[in-house]
Amino acid sequence: MPWKETTTMSMRIEFIKLAKQDGANISELCRRFGISRKTGYKWLKRNREGGDSGLADRSRRPHHSPGRSSGETETMVVDVRRAHPVWGGRKIKAYLENKRQTGVPSASTITEILRRNDQIEAEEALKHKSFQRFEMEQPNQLWQMDFKGYFLLEEGGYCHPLTVLDDHSRFLLGLKACSNETRQTVQEQLTSIFRCFGLPERMLMDNGRPWGFDADAPHTRLTAWLLNLGVQICHGRPYHPQTQGKDERLHRTMQAELISQYSLSNLQECQSCFDQWRDIYNFERPHEALQMQPPISRYQSSSTQFPETLPPIFYDTHDIVRKVDESGKIYFKGRVFRISKAFCHYPVALRPILQDDIYDVYFCQAKVAQINLRVNNC
């Protein structure tokens, strides 16, 4: 991930944030970010001496804080909250903008104003949660991935935002402006994310293309690639988007704070805006689910490195191994069984279970099918 790209400053900041985490491996981070150790330690030193402003020849941040909310602004926000006690930051922001007020702060800043003026009680906030969401205990145990709904660009064509979110920390690992939703595009974007942050244990996604067709055919060439990398796959229940509640909530926030606020001309402009907003989301924006701390407060990079070459597939010596043909079928005991085109040209392992004539089919470490010799499976 060389620093000669247009996102130089944001990449330096992200490197510094990750390098400051307890137990961070500086050498490994330098490798993932495509810089030398000398460069990495140079920017760590500059950050210690001058903060984020020391990371660039010309600071992208002012030395002072002219954007700090004034007493008048805080009074305006608190008055609206008292008049509408159930309104949150985004709703108050929209209300003030509709009233054509000047100097309206961002939704996250309004939330912080409410908190420090004792307008938000933790016990009361819990009552407004529609349901209790599950949460992984550690970073990188589960990443959620999805496309936010595409939108039209001013110069023509569409932007398909791809989001990849860590379940434990809500850290936004990737926010990519894509021209389509094909397997090749997603795999290229995931490769860049894996190179930077390492591999997760599992990934959660819905049943749409390119990572799943339906409950009966959950695997694609993309998920086969992930399984070969050692990443386990799980899919949300069909027509139940709440399974990916954190990613769905992220998309609502993106719509309110980013997409609806700008008229974007092309994918390059989209990515520039995405990068800036992602920095704010990860490193500055208070998150209610994280006790008003930003996601970086709970995230650390994965210790599992991304291999540039796919590892070979090995099975146990007692496994029955068959190769899947181009049509997605295998031949076993004079019979033909359909497995999935996702695994064509790959070997799979057949393992008998307690019932006679029934075998579980494994690809790498994942069970992907079951065959019954008593039934014509093809």
Image (cartoon, helix red, strand yellow):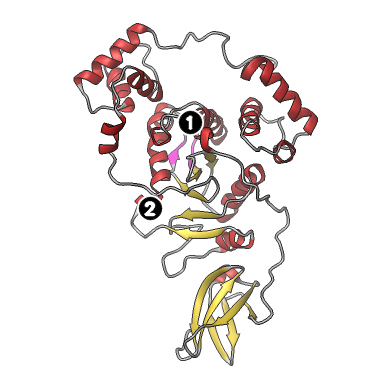
For disc 1, the neighbor class at 10 Å (few under 14, some 14 to 19, many from 20) is many
Say what amino acid the circle numbered 2 marks. Thr
The quadrant of the rendering that contains the N terminus is top right
Q: Which mark is residue 339?
A: none
Q: Position of residue 224 (x, y in %)?
A: 58, 63
Residue 369 is a magenta residue: no
Of discs 1 and 2, which sits in the foreground? 1
Q: Is residue 186 above or below residue 76?
A: below
Q: Position of residue 12 (x, y in %)?
A: 66, 28
For disc 2, the neighbor class at 10 Å (few under 14, some 14 to 19, many from 20) is some
Query: Which residue is identified by label 2?
Result: 243
Residue nearer the viewer, 255 or 195: 195
**What is the CA distance from the residue labelled 1 to the residue labelled 2?**
23 Å
State the count of labels.
2
Question: Which residues, given as a range, are shown in magenta?
Answer: 151-160
Q: Is residue 210 above or below residue 64?
A: below
Report the residue at 35% width, 7% height from top. Answer: 71
Q: Is residue 65 above or below residue 247?
A: above
Residue nearer the viewer, 187 or 37: 37
Say what amino acid the circle numbered 1 marks. Pro
Query: Which residue is identified by label 1?
Result: 294
Q: Position of residue 42 (x, y in %)?
A: 75, 24
